[in-house]
Image (cartoon, rainbow, N blue to C red):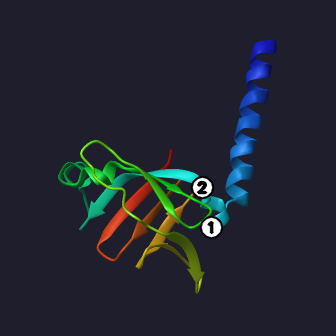
Amino acid sequence: MKKLFALLIIATIAYSCKKDEAATCTWQNSTLNDKTYKITKIVTAGVDVTTIAQSADPCLKNTWKLNATGLVTETLSAGCSGPSFLTWKTHTASGKNYFITGSDTSLVNSFDCNSFTASDGTTLTTMTKQ
């Protein structure tokens, strides 16, 4: 009985911590600062093309550290030359969130502190925290 009670307390604490994190998570630079993300899903015209896209362009397997300075530090995957120079920032306007890399702006469709999905108008890309 004591073990069951201890497990219940641990589960309650774990659930409470996740709930609190989600409640305080907002789309802004400081939320993403110094976090590392990787592309985990690419959808075009409703079709998941992640495997095909990453086979054609191994750089899509890179991880991106979003530095507080506004620069991206990429960890290159096998077969990818670089690194590329990218800047990043978040933006919110008229109740919509945007992820900006260099001169490209993508509309953020969803964000939950561990991942976000953004669209450039034709492709949905999901980035997941590593």
Callout 1 secondary element: helix
Location of residue 106 by image quarter: bottom left
The amino acid type of the residue labelled 1 equals Asn
The amino acid type of the residue labelled 2 equals Cys
- Location of mark 2 (residue): 113
Q: Is residue 8 above or below residue 60?
A: above
The residue lying at 20 percent from left, 48 percent from top is: 55
> On residue 29, which mark appears?
1
Residue 26 visible in the snapshot: no
Q: Is residue 64 left or right of residue 20?
A: left
Foreground tag (1 vs 2): 1
Q: Earlier in the sequence, mark 1 or mark 2?
A: 1
* Rendered location of residue 19, percent (x, y): 71, 49
Location of residue 67 by image quarter: bottom right
The residue nearer to you, when weighing 75 against 127, is 75
Q: Is residue 90 above or below residue 25?
A: below
How far separated are the C-alphas under marks 1 and 2? 12 Å
